């Protein structure tokens, strides 16, 4: 009952309420991003959602567009200023994903939506993470996030798809809030374009992160 009917309804209501209550925060962050990092304020990127349907995910940008003498973008680590690291460490960069939840692209709790480039590399078992809507947070995020291997992350993701319950979602949400407040294991390595490729020995690719 919860998985089929209540979860989506609660996602919509809670995300909409959060968007309204946090609107002053959105405005302040947007202005600071515009001043410190430039335009566009919102970073958009295609991600696979439920049943691997591609959607556009929204985040506040955290990197500059600095380029070398040849006009090529500098490496990510050189384009990530102190302010961008602050947005990531506090997870403020992910606030625009609340709009994805309202639209129905995402859920509050679920496997994190990773880059489209990974789709061709999942095993049959790992593809099950797309049986549900991707989430703002999930089991992997409260169990180590970037300090655990990809196999462990995928294991948590698949486990979640088979054990969805209201009680577990509430638990994950409160654990996530605690980790964000403590800035514990909060980073963006899970979305770095080559982290999975490096771990599995695949050829590096360009994901165009920001």
Image (spheres, rainbow, N blue to C red):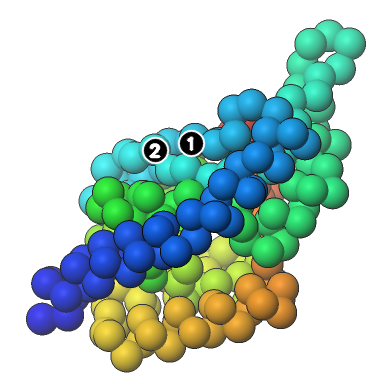
Where residue 114 sits in the image (x, y, percent)? 48, 50
Foreground: 104 or 69?
Answer: 104
Residue 201 visible to an observer of this rendering: no
Is 69 situated above or below 115?
above
Q: Residue at x 32, y 90 (%)?
A: 167
For the residues marked 2 and 1, what is the alpha-carbon distance in whole angstroms? 5 Å
Q: In which quarter of the view is residue 188 placed?
A: bottom right
Where residue 181 sits in the image (x, y, percent)? 66, 77
Which residue is label 2 attached to? 56
Q: Residue at x 62, y 61 (%)?
A: 91
Is 167 situated above or below 77?
below
Residue 45, disc: 1
Q: Residue at x 70, y 28 (%)?
A: 38
Identify the image quadrant of the N terminus. bottom left
Foreground: 51 or 104?
Answer: 104
Classify mark 1: residues with Cα within 10 Å, few (<14), some (14-19) or many (20+): some
Identify the image quadrant of the C terminus. top right
Q: Residue at x 72, y 73 (%)?
A: 183
The extreme right residue here reads: 69
Q: Are marks 2 and 1 in contact (CB under 8 Å)?
A: yes
Task: Please report whichever mark, 2 or 1, sits nearer to the chain's N-terminal start.
Answer: 1
The extreme front residue here reads: 24
**Helix, strand, or loop for circle 2?**
strand
């Amino acid at each position: 009952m919860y998985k089929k009917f209540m979860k989506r309804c609660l996602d919509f209501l809670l995300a909409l309420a959060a968007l309204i209550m946090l609107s002053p925060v959105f405005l302040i962050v947007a202005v600071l991003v515009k001043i410190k990092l430039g335009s566009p304020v919102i970073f958009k990127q295609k991600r696979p959602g439920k049943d691997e349907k591609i959607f556009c995910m929204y985040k506040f940008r955290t990197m500059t567009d600095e380029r070398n003498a040849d006009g090529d973008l500098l490496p990510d680590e050189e384009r990530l200023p102190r302010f961008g690291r602050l947005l990531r460490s506090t997870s403020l960069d992910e606030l625009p994903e609340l709009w994805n939840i309202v639209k129905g692209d995402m859920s509050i709790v679920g496997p994190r939506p990773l880059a489209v480039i990974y789709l061709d590399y999942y095993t049959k078992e790992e593809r099950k993470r797309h049986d549900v809507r991707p989430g703002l947070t999930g089991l992997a995020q409260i169990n180590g996030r970037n300090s655990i291997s990809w196999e462990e992350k995928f294991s948590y993701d698949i486990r979640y798809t088979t054990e969805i319950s209201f009680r577990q979602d509430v638990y994950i949400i409160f654990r996530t809030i605690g980790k964000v407040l403590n800035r514990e294991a909060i980073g963006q390595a899970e979305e770095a374009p080559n982290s999975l490729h490096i771990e599995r020995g695949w050829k590096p690719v360009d994901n165009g992160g920001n």
